[in-house]
Image (cartoon, helix red, strand yellow):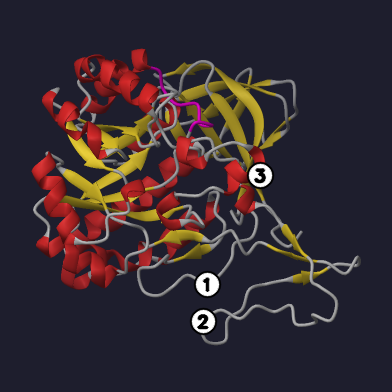
Amino acid sequence: MVELLAPAGNFISLRAVLENGADAVYFGLDNFNMRANAKNFSLNDLSEVSKISKEYGAKTYLGTNIILNERLANELNANLESIAASEIDGLILSDIGLIEDTVSHGLEAHISVQENVTNSYTLKTLKKLGAKRAILSRELSLKEITEITSKSPIETEIFIHGAICMAISGRCFLSYGLYGRSANCGDCLQPCRKNWTLTYEEGEDNVVNFSDVEDERFTITGSDDGSYRTNFFSPKDMCMIDYIPQLMESGVASFKIEGRSRSPDYGAMVTGVYREAIDNYNEDPLNFEVKAEWMDKLSSVFNRGFDTNFYFNTPFETSEDNQSKYIKKDIGQVVNYYSKVKAAELRIWDDLNLGDEIMIQGPTTGSITHTIDSMQIEGEAVSHVEKGSNVAIAVATKVRENDFVYKLVERDNDD
């Protein structure tokens, strides 16, 4: 049975992906992971992460996938006893030098995509060192993944959804070169996502850079000052929802969703969609059908447009800004929840109407989306509430005091 592995950047995201069917979660500590700019967890949080995950029967993997200098390697090694005591399941390592120590503490050693594993010979060597799993390079095709996995003595894992880095398996020096902030140490400022300006020497008129894919080109926009703007460093996000059967037949042990820095609703939505797709395939592989609503849901949360990475050909399309259908507008907070009548009292600082779609998020609630179909003020049914009010809404899922409330407002992607 393939594992669905989801990201958790904080306790709200953790609960959100677990509620939506994640078989396992991965997360980071402040000092040792590739998302230093995410909120992350402290060493003292790990026991609680483990406890919550076990409630759902989910496994837990701690990302320690930065380039470790001597000081950081010593620090991580010294923390292995405490990490193991928290009862998480394993570590995601980018440094093979720590495999032996990791395993000796009773933890699984998973090898990060940063190791750029591209063949079965490497996997056989990793097996000898004690690794249980390796995340395969992002630059492999699905055909190559299937072949390598068939020869592998250890589990393999692949990314199936989320952001794609411009560099080989994420090993990039652009952020460091421009800002002195190293992507390889988890501190990437993502300059590749910015809108770059191109300038050309005198006499150079051809500004269209054709890719090796027939009839496709990079988008380069002319400016009044004679320069040209483009996002050619920034790939579209990966989305493999249309190819679940091919992925399932590859023999890979784990499907990974990228996104520890993204919002809890992103984790909830993406995890839920892939959970449904995987379950549908397992129930009836021969009659599996891709639902149009899956792509609609995936498009509703943050994305830069979608591509299939290297699975079928070389990616050629550059991304644009966020292409999600909605933006989240902070409009209020939960005051109380009344379980007997299944209603929540909200304090709002923006107008609210029947039919509005809202999102409620909290460390225990996770992330839920709800369309308002009933509102009351002091026992009287209302269809519109002005900002500054307290209002009761019917909501079947239990929410908690101080949970955040957002209104989903349709985005105009033509702006």
Distance between the alpha carbons at the discs numbered 1 and 2: 8 Å
Image vertical order of residue 382 relative to residue 333, above or below:
below
Q: Residue at x 72, y 58 (%)?
A: 196
Examine the rendering and report whether any part of residue 314 can be seen: yes
Residue at the extreme bottom of the image, as rendered: 214
Marking on residue 212: 2
Q: Give the residue pinned by disc 1.
A: 316
- In this picture, is 157 found above or below 266? below
In the picture, which quadrant includes the C terminus? Answer: bottom right
Under circle 3, the secondary element is helix
Taking the spot 35% from the left edge, 68% from the top edge, the residue there is 311
Q: Where's residue 337, x and y in %?
A: 47, 18
Residue beneath label 3, please?
Answer: 178
Q: Which residues are magenta?
A: 36-42
Q: Amino acid at mark 1?
A: Phe
Residue 30 rendering spot, x and y as whole percentages: 44, 23
Note whether residue 396 is visible. no
| Secondary element type, mark 1 | loop
Give percent across and percent down for residue 41: 41, 22
Front in this rendered view, residue 66 or 367: 66
